[in-house]
Structure formats: C-alpha cells, structure tokens
Image (cartoon, rainbow, N blue to C red):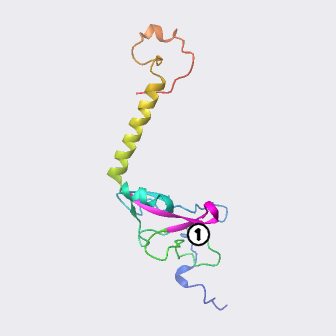
Amino acid sequence: MAENPANKPQTRVTDATRVPMSVPTRRLEVPEDACPGYHLHWFLDENIIRAQRAGYEFVDANEVSLNQKNVATDATVSGNIDMGSRVCVYAGLGQFGKPTYLYLMKLRNEWWEKDQKALEEMNQRILDRIFRDRQVLDDGSLRPSDRSSTYVKTSLMERK
C-alpha cells in the first residue's frame, strides 16, 4: 500500500505518542517543565499591561508547544496563533463582538511565591477581623478537661 504523502513519517502516531479519543485534552495545557524557574499564567489581552507592571514576561513560542485543536493540522504543529514570537490562543468574543486572545506569560518563582505570601497574609487579616470576638475551639487556651464540654455555636475555619 502506498503511503499518503501528507503523513510525514516523523508525525505518525506511535504507542508512546498516542492519546486515546476518550481522554480529554485541555486547550490551555502547557508542560510543567516548559519554563523552569517560572510560574506560567494565561492573561487576557486587556490585562497584559498590568501583568507586565507586576513583572510578567511573554513566553516565546519556541519555549512551549500547545495542544493543537485545528482540524486537519499536523499534530506536531503548535496550537499557537500569534504571528510573532509570543504564545497566544483565541479566547472568544469580548465586548461588542471584538475577538479576545489569551497570552501565556511567565513570572519568576521567587516573585510569585512572594505574591502568594502577601495574598495569604491579606486573607488572614480578613479572617482575623471576621472572627475577632469569637473563641476558636482548641486554640491552645482550653484545659484538656474543658475541650469536650465546650460548645461553639458555629463551626469556625481553622486559623493560625
């Protein structure tokens, strides 16, 4: 049987590269090791300027390969739609029917961890204000004999 010239030998599916039809594929999935030392995040095109002010940088197309969702496109071709070097996918229609796009950006891990810690501290302050006059069950101030007989009207979230 003659081979189809559209199917290049290097793009044929093998047992190692085969993905069954019943397995879902995520459109925005990026390999975890795509950009070592960085946290990856997708941003709507309208949020890019703010992301850049926070230290995010564009991911280059040669750094990652996206899931291909186009019909009849070779599986080795990335799902990136940007004409330049940025990683971009179509997100849908925005306000007034204007197309919107998602751009993949990266932030240094140390900055991302610092941001997460600040967010956690802010959330903790909010919880402290909500529960400021309530006793947290077993906060260490109760005697062991009193723990089983102490009534708390509502279940409180675990706090530091």
Vertical position of residue 44 compared to residue 68: above or below:
above
Instruction: Residue at the far front: name it.
Output: 96
Three-letter amino acid code at the position of disc 1? Arg
Vertical position of residue 146 compared to residue 100: above or below:
above
Could one spot residue 44 in this view of the protein? no
Main SS, magenta region, reads strand
Side (left or right) of 28 relative to 54: right
Magenta residues, start to end: 88-107
Residue at (45% x, 68% y) in the render: 64
Residue labelled with disc 1: 18
Q: Does the magenta stretch include residue 95?
A: yes
Residue at (37% x, 56% y) in the render: 53
Vertical position of residue 145 compared to residue 32: above or below:
above
Q: How many labels does the image show?
A: 1
Measuring from the top left, give residue 39's x and y in whole percent: 40, 55
Quadrant occupied by the C terminus? top left
Measuring from the top left, give residue 146's x and y in whole percent: 46, 8
Badge 1 marks a residue whose secondary structure is loop
Could one spot residue 67 in this view of the protein? yes
Residue at (55% x, 84% y) in the render: 9
Quadrant occupied by the N terminus? bottom right
Q: Quadrant of residue 22?
A: bottom right
Measuring from the top left, give residue 63's x and y in whole percent: 41, 69
